């Protein structure tokens, strides 16, 4: 999954490894990649929360839903299941790559992420030697045109300041008839806000001891794109193969927690 750690709605890979920026806490300068993804922690004490990410989002009540999110990303991709020599790219997989949930064979599994301190590089070497991992700047995908049969990006697009541009960058490296699998939170839909309220009041105070304002603030600077805007961009500019609304399976953002879409490159 990608980019956030403790927050219902902040996903998993981008945030957990970026240092605090100058604007946020008076430390290191702000780089273009950090500006693009706008995933800042605003106090230094938050920098160690990445250690709790896996336990927080992949166990208990939250774990059930986030694991289901990955499982649903394997639906509606039948054309890949009978294909050989598949090249896969995962973007922002963080410490919980989607490879754990993959339901089809592949030749090579690549993963790219923002990783300024080489934490992920060491993590993958020690835990996922089958994944070909490399760092990137968060803007340009370092592969040639038409290289991948499938691209996987889970809970990242809501953090990107120019999601349409990044979607086209993914399309560039995807082969014709290739699949782009996207998972998104339904923030700020009604069910998502209700779930976030529940976690704020009954869970995070015990695990991370943040004030309500701290919790709301970090969520506010994390999710720079609403699901309504992202789905509009996707529907307008890209070829949708299938959509899944979970858990109620009703085609209504407000009544679900996750939106999973498979795009196909024509």
Image (cartoon, rainbow, N blue to C red):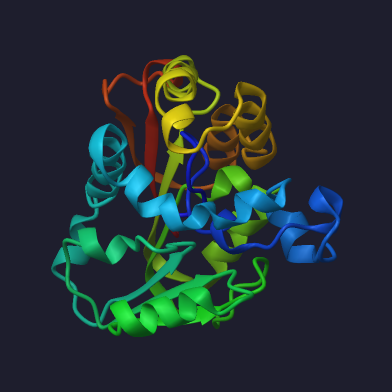
Total labels drawn: 0
Can the viewer see residue 39?
no
- Give the residue drawn at x 61%, y 56%: 47
Residue sitting farthest toward the left: 82
Q: Residue at x 28, y 49 (%)?
A: 70
Left of 2 or right of it: where is 98? Answer: left
The answer to which of 79 and 109 lies nearer the viewer is: 109
Residue beneath the point at 46% across and 54% down:
2
Residue 257 x %, y %: 38, 27
| Image quarter hosting the C terminus | bottom left
Q: Nearer the viewer, residue 22 or 233?
A: 22
Left or right of residue 87: residue 119: right
Q: Is residue 83 above or below residue 245?
A: below
- In this view of the protein, which residue sits in the foreground, 56 or 99? 56
Residue drawn at 48 percent across, 46 percent down: 11
In which quadrant is the N terminus drawn? bottom left
Give the answer, above or below, for where 69 lies relative to 179.
Answer: above
Whole-percent x and y of residue 20?
Answer: 73, 57
Q: Nearer the viewer, residue 218 or 228?
A: 218
Image location (x, y in percent) of residue 8:
46, 33
Q: Position of residue 78 (x, y in %)?
A: 18, 56
Instruction: Decide if residue 170 is in sight here.
Output: yes
Direction from residue 13 to residue 82 in the image, left or right = left
Image quarter for residue 35? bottom right
């Amino acid at each position: 999954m990608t980019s956030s750690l403790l927050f219902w709605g902040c996903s998993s890979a981008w945030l957990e490894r970026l240092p605090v920026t100058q604007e946020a806490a008076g430390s290191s300068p702000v780089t273009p990649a950090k500006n693009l993804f706008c995933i800042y922690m605003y106090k230094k004490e938050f920098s160690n929360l990445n250690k709790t990410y896996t336990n927080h989002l992949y166990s208990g009540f939250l774990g059930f839903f986030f694991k289901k999110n990955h499982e649903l990303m394997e639906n509606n991709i039948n054309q890949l299941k009978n294909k050989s020599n598949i090249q896969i790219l995962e973007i922002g997989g963080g410490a919980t790559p989607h490879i754990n949930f993959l339901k089809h064979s592949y030749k090579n599994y690549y993963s790219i992420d923002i990783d300024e301190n080489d934490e992920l590089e060491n993590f993958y070497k020690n835990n996922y030697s089958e994944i070909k991992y490399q760092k990137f700047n968060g803007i340009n995908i370092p592969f040639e045109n038409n290289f991948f049969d499938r691209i996987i990006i889970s809970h990242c697009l809501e953090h990107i300041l120019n999601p349409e541009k990044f979607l086209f960058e993914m399309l560039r490296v995807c082969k014709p008839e290739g699949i782009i699998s996207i998972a998104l939170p339904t923030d700020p839909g009604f069910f998502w806000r209700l779930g976030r309220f529940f976690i704020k009041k009954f869970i995070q105070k015990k695990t991370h001891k943040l004030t309500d304002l701290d919790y709301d603030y970090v969520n506010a600077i994390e999710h720079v794109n609403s699901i309504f805007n992202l789905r509009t961009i996707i529907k307008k500019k890209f070829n949708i193969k299938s959509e899944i609304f979970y858990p109620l399976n009703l085609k209504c953002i407000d009544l679900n927690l996750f939106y999973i879409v498979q795009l196909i490159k024509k």
